[in-house]
Image (tube, helix red, strand yellow):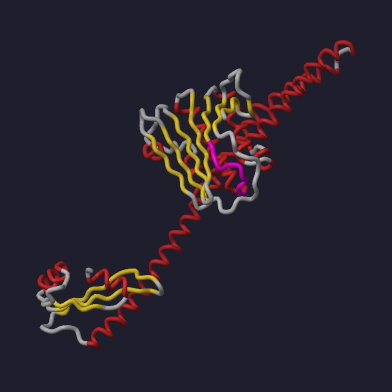
Amino acid sequence: MPATRLVLEERQPRVILATNPDADPAEVALLREQGAVSLLMLPLAAGDRVIGLAKLVNGAERTFTDAEIGLCRALASQAAVAIQNALLFEEVRAGRQRLETLSRQLVELQEIERRHIARELHDEISQVLTGLKLALETIRRLPADMARERLGKAQELVNELMARVRELSLDLRPTMLDDSGLLPALLWHFGHYTAQTGVVVSFEHSGLERRFSAEVETAAYRIVQEALTNVARYAGVNEVAVRVTADEEKLYVEVEDEGVGFDPMSALGAGSTFGLVGMHERAILLGGQLTLDSAPGRGTRLKAELPVGDAINKGDSDAGNNHRAGRRSPDRSRGAAGVVRN
């Protein structure tokens, strides 16, 4: 076994002699290069960790004495502590920078969401309210028999307003995500998504019969939601594949399309992140990870892994694990997201 490995495993100093026929050829070559007869190797250990290895060449025509080995061992111990402290300081500094970056990005995400809500309120809700206000003012000046006819139009505007408010509320956070869990919320979203965009969602899942923490379910839902939004906006496809599976340790999300694709680095450099920052940060904040594989002309595949910890509770059996939103077949039952294939 090489002397370096022995030193690291046994955490004991070792002296290599150039005259030793069993010595590691690499160590002997180092001695000869230095014109020395002995080499002292010491582990750099801090606590229960070995963080490095120190090598000292004796240029004299003799080997190391016990006193010299003891002194070098003490110096190596001090050096290891100093190096460990420097590494810990760098980790703390990097962690602080990471937290600062996360805070800025979260603020930016909040502002983006607020701008979206403001646009929806102004462009959609405000217009309907204006129309309703004008209709009611007109009705007030009409005779009773004519007013009844106009009240029907006003009622339609009220119904439209209620529908748009409900749609906006569901876009912000579907109540079924809290009430029923990730799978029903995803199925609802796929049906809603296909109705709006015309893009069919081919959905495969397993392990979703249990509930996960609110943080995990929210992150998985938002990652799928944002990824599908990108598909509708940029991919130029009529179908997208979504796979969500879970085991005892992690929940896995995969969204894949065969669309036009893009260069992720160029997109980031140009500031066109396609919501990637938000998706990435959601995964990182939970101790997970998110990867993106894409290139012009060969589609896009997004993968996320989220630690799940212990399941909250058991739900109904997750028997049907293949769903397809947006296409109807007369010989199959239609679920919340379209046709369910069992």
Give the magenta part as a residue range.
205-213
Q: Is residue 126 above or below residue 311?
A: above
Q: Is residue 307 above or below residue 206?
A: below
Q: Quadrant of residue 170?
A: top right
Q: Quadrant of residue 5?
A: bottom left
Q: In front: 331, or 109?
A: 331
- Principal secondary structure, stretch drawn in magenta: loop
Q: Position of residue 151 (x, y in %)?
A: 82, 17
Q: In front: 287, or 281?
A: 287
Residue lying at the far right in this picture: please name it. 144
Q: In front: 318, or 306?
A: 318
Left or right: 326 in relation to 174: left
Q: Position of residue 10 (x, y in %)?
A: 31, 74
The quadrant of the image that shows the N terminus is: bottom left
Q: Is residue 302 above or below residue 25?
A: above
Q: Residue at x 52, y 51 (%)?
A: 249
The quadrant of the image that shows the C terminus is: top right
Q: Residue at x 56, y 21 (%)?
A: 327
Q: Is residue 192 above or below residue 285?
A: above
Q: Position of residue 212 (x, y in %)?
A: 60, 47
Left or right: 64 in relation to 240: left
Q: In front: 124, or 183?
A: 183
Q: Residue at x 45, y 33 (%)?
A: 256
Q: Quadrant of residue 334?
A: top right
Image label count: 0
215 drawn magenta: no
Residue lying at the far bottom in this picture: please name it. 67
210 drawn magenta: yes
Q: Position of residue 92 (x, y in %)?
A: 45, 63
